[in-house]
Amino acid sequence: MSDSGRSDTPEPGSVRSDRLRIGVVGGGYIGTTVGETFVEHADAQVAALTDIDEETLETAGVELGVDPDSRYTEYESMLDSEALDAVLVGTPHTLHYDQILAAFERDLHVLCDKPLTTDLDEARELVSLDRERDEVLMIGYQRHLYQAFVRAREVWAEDDREPRWITAEVCQDWVDRFEDTWRQDPDLSGGGYLYDTGSHLLDCVLWSTGLTPEAVSADMTFLDDRERVDGRANVTVRFTNGATASFSLSGETPCMREHVRMWDERGAVVLDSQDWEPSEYAEIDDESGEHRPHLPQRGRQSKAEAFVEAIRTGERPTATALDGLRVTAVTEAAYQSARGDGSFVTVDPADVALESEAPIRQRE
């Protein structure tokens, strides 16, 4: 044990004799669904839980098997009272920044649901601080764990291939389903559909292609007079290599569908999903037409498994703070454009260039 009472973090590649102790922040959907995967993990345990709502706290506490004495209504109290190794942040978007900082101050590993934060300066600060830490900060973009998007990333990593024209769309019954919830309260959500489900769509394109955005334009249909919560959005992103991506998002359809097409001169990669299932994958080329290559059938890692693996090995997590910053930079530019006249808004290259990714640091 360290002087603070928190269990010590192992050297990369070493094996602990005990399990990682996880504190879950927020007993809602993310806290319970991702929290359950930690409960099932042989090398982790949910040791504590916090939620401001006592009824939610009790329900989630029972579901996750957290002792009543380790359930808290105040986050800081949990951090100060429990011997934790890591926290799972599953709270509304605008709370992420302060909660990550509090975990950083205590040298904890952090798995934070998307987005990293809804403020660009806050995202920049978290990336800067994360580079100086040995602990893991992972963002909950699960498409990084889907074989279809891993395969797409491999295609565009080939030396002679680079996407030039991209279309991506996602839709669901978001507007009616989440009326009068925190997801449509901009003080908690930071925006609307683009900052919620749309965050995944932006991320999967940015991560799979590795392209650097340079400018963003958007038009949105807002649900409120102050134009803070969008229900539909059309976003165009220009990249430094001359490529463009068109994103179409609607929270007003009766069911969920996601379709992504990434083209170059030789063909395309095609990804389709429905009802939140992992995407089906196909490739199109100018000689053989459309085909579906065999993808590895090994079991897909959960977020918990990927997070624990990054902690154990000292390697970069599957979704990094820089991935989160890139999405926040594009999202904030889209809102600025849509709330203005729809003109292109320049993105600071320092926020979105992958060259700024710091090398993996080995813990001493």
Image (spheres, rainbow, N blue to C red):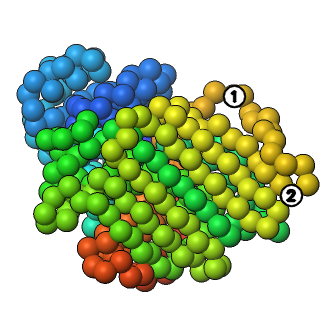
Asked if residue 112 shows in the view, the reply is: no
Residue shown at the point (78%, 58%) measured from the top left: 267
Disc 2 element: loop
Looking at the image, which is closer to me, 185 or 251? 251
Q: Mark 2 belongs to which amino acid? A: Asp
Q: From the top left corner, tell me how far across and down residue 171 is, in percent.
A: 42, 45
Which tag is nearer the camera, tag 2 or tag 1?
A: 2
Instruction: Determine which residue is flagged by label 2.
Output: 286
Looking at the image, which is closer to me, 289 or 68? 289
Q: Mark 1 belongs to which amino acid? A: Arg
In the displayed structure, would residue 253 be above or below residue 125?
above
Residues marked 2 and 1 touching at CB (< 8 Å): no
Asked if residue 322 shows in the view, the reply is: yes
In the displayed structure, would residue 355 be above or below residue 200?
below
Mark 1 Cα shell of 10 Å, populated few (<14), some (14-19), many (≥20)? few
Instruction: Determine which residue is flagged by label 1.
Output: 298
Disc 1 element: loop
Residue shown at the point (36%, 74%) measured from the top left: 333
138 horizontally vs 213: left or right: left
Q: From the top left corner, tell me how far across and down residue 266 is, in percent.
A: 82, 63
Residue shown at the point (38%, 32%) measured from the top left: 34
Q: From the top left corner, tell me how far across and down residue 192 is, in percent.
A: 27, 55
